[in-house]
Amino acid sequence: MTNNQDRYRSDRNLSQLPPVSEWDSKIDAARDFISSNLPIQPVPSAPEIRLYKAGPQSGLWRLAEQDPEFGSPYWAHHWGGGLVLARYLLDRPEVVSGRRVLDLGAGSGIVGIAAAKAGAAEVIAADVDPYAIAATGLNAAVNKITVIPVLADLTKGEPPATDIVCVGDLFYDAALAECVTAFLDRCLEQGIDVLIGDPWRAYLPHRRLRLLAEYAVPDFGAATGGRPSGVFAFERKTPRQSRGDEDQS
């Protein structure tokens, strides 16, 4: 990861990135644990992709005991928004073929992996959790594709050099949704396309979305069943929304 993240820092001047060496040991330990304890399984609704996925015997609690900063292991489970975005990109490779893609809040890296399989010219997979970065690197290797994992909160600054941003499952919390929406507005201002995948959660900016496709997929790590989840184009504010005359939620 070091060479890729160093290159990304140099090329894009992302000052918010932590020193790479600060996280190397944690990411290496996470890789060892994931590869030793999580089975590789085909993805529901996108069997072309295989991921390390937590199961009943994975023992993720051991990671939590070892690391007081260990958060929710969302990177070890399937989420509806990531599943529908992955399926959409695999079904419509022309959306990303030959383009630079940013997978924002990458988690397991499933969306970035789908973009790479669909022919993207470059895929950046950004997340704030070093465990997600470890999982993304391993999952990319399993699928024999290349992504650049980047440990950073990109929503705090200007968008990097990219052509399209893919956002799966980042609208489950009001404060996070507000921050992400502001970042996506900056992306639109720079001519960057935005796709969102989400199972219709409460904090989606509904009035800013155009539904492109809908699939029934599992969510929150479920192996079976499904709930409707949408793929949306995120669009510019209308003049009324820009003036504050219309509810933007």
Image (cartoon, grey):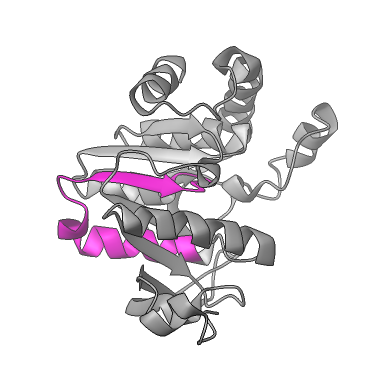
The answer to whether 96 appears left or right of 62 in the picture is left
Q: Let me know if residue 158 is in the magenta part.
A: no
Q: Residue at x 59, y 12 (%)?
A: 21
* Relative vertical location of residue 47 with respect to residue 127 in this rendering, above or below: below
Q: Is residue 24 visible?
A: yes
The magenta segment: 81-109
Q: Residue at x 66, y 21 (%)?
A: 26
Residue furthest to the front: 243
Q: Residue at x 43, y 17 (%)?
A: 6
The answer to whether 140 appears left or right of 77 in the picture is left
* Relative vertical location of residue 228 with respect to residue 123 in this rendering, above or below: below
Q: Residue at x 56, y 67 (%)?
A: 219
Q: How many labels, in total?
A: 0
Nearer the observer, 39 or 150 = 150
Quadrant occupied by the C terminus: bottom right
Place of residue 31 in the rendered image (x, y in percent of width and height, measured from the top left): 57, 26
Nearer the observer, 163 or 106 = 163
Quadrant occupied by the N terminus: top left
* Relative vertical location of residue 85 with respect to residue 74 in this rendering, above or below: below
Place of residue 78 in the rendered image (x, y in percent of width and height, measured from the top left): 54, 57
* Relative vertical location of residue 66 with respect to residue 217 in this rendering, above or below: above
The answer to whether 32 appears left or right of 66 in the picture is left
Q: Is residue 47 visible?
A: no
Q: Let me know if residue 86 is in the magenta part.
A: yes
Place of residue 234 in the rendered image (x, y in percent of width and height, measured from the top left): 37, 69
Place of residue 169 in the rendered image (x, y in percent of width and height, measured from the top left): 53, 61
Nearer the observer, 162 or 57 = 162
